[in-house]
Amino acid sequence: MIRVLLADDQTLVRAGFRSILSDEDDFEIVAEAANGAAAVAGAREHRPDVVLMDIRMPELDGLEATRQITADARLEGVKVIILTTFDLDDYVYAALQAGASGFLVKDTEPAELIHAVRVVARGDALIAPSITRRLIAEFAGRVKRPEPGPELNALTEREREVMALVAGGLSNDEIAARLVLSPATAKTHVSRIMTKLSVRDRAQLVIIAYEAGMIVPGWVTP
């Protein structure tokens, strides 16, 4: 069962997401929140698998709420999906830096929402990778990027290659096919990279890859 917390200041939006997810046998809506502070409190109380987090909310916005959730060691297993609209794209890169596992546009199709929550709950892929890649590529170039940390020195050449492909939006199966590996081996590489870099999920690998200059905005996997 995938436990979900809905955080949005619009009651109708929450009701819509609740209706869509509640129709599935493997989802349980454990709480709702009308602002970021309530979302953080709800996450600490209910320990959901996934939080669907709006950005613009009163008291505490979704970006800061995401930071607080992802920084709390007690909530290590809680994944955050940011809900955005295309006129809020400037927030996307910052949201992923804050620890979000990905994002969805609010008018996404129900099937895509369901799939995205399942995917991020198991932690093995970004949400809507083609959209994520395009927006990160656009806005990464506008954000002042820190110098790459020494952690990257711990990666092997193969792990760097795998990480670049992850940042390009490839799934484990696609990485395996590209590098002529078994899917299990590709998954092991990704897990080891995440452990070495102390990141929560694949979304954070994308951020680090851009910041380290491993790939650049507009880069497309050959």
Image: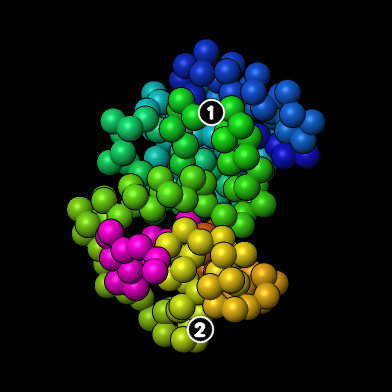
Magenta region: which residues? 203-222
Element class at badge 2: helix
Q: Which quarter of the figure is the N terminus placed in?
A: top right
Q: Residue at x 28, y 30 (%)?
A: 87
Disc 2 crowd rating (10 Å Cα; few below 14, some 14-19, many 20+) is few
Q: Nearer the viewer, residue 51 or 210?
A: 210
Q: Position of residue 82 (x, y in %)?
A: 46, 38
Mark 1 sits on what residue?
109
As drawn, which residue projects farthest toward the top?
12
Image-based side of 11 in relation to 136, left or right: right
Of the residues under marks 2 and 1, which one precedes in the sequence? 1
Mark 2 sits on what residue?
158
- Could you tell me if residue 100 is visible in this image? no
**Display colour scheme:** rainbow
Q: Is residue 118 magenta?
A: no
Q: Position of residue 90 (x, y in %)?
A: 27, 41
CA gap, disc 2 and disc 1: 37 Å
Element class at badge 1: loop
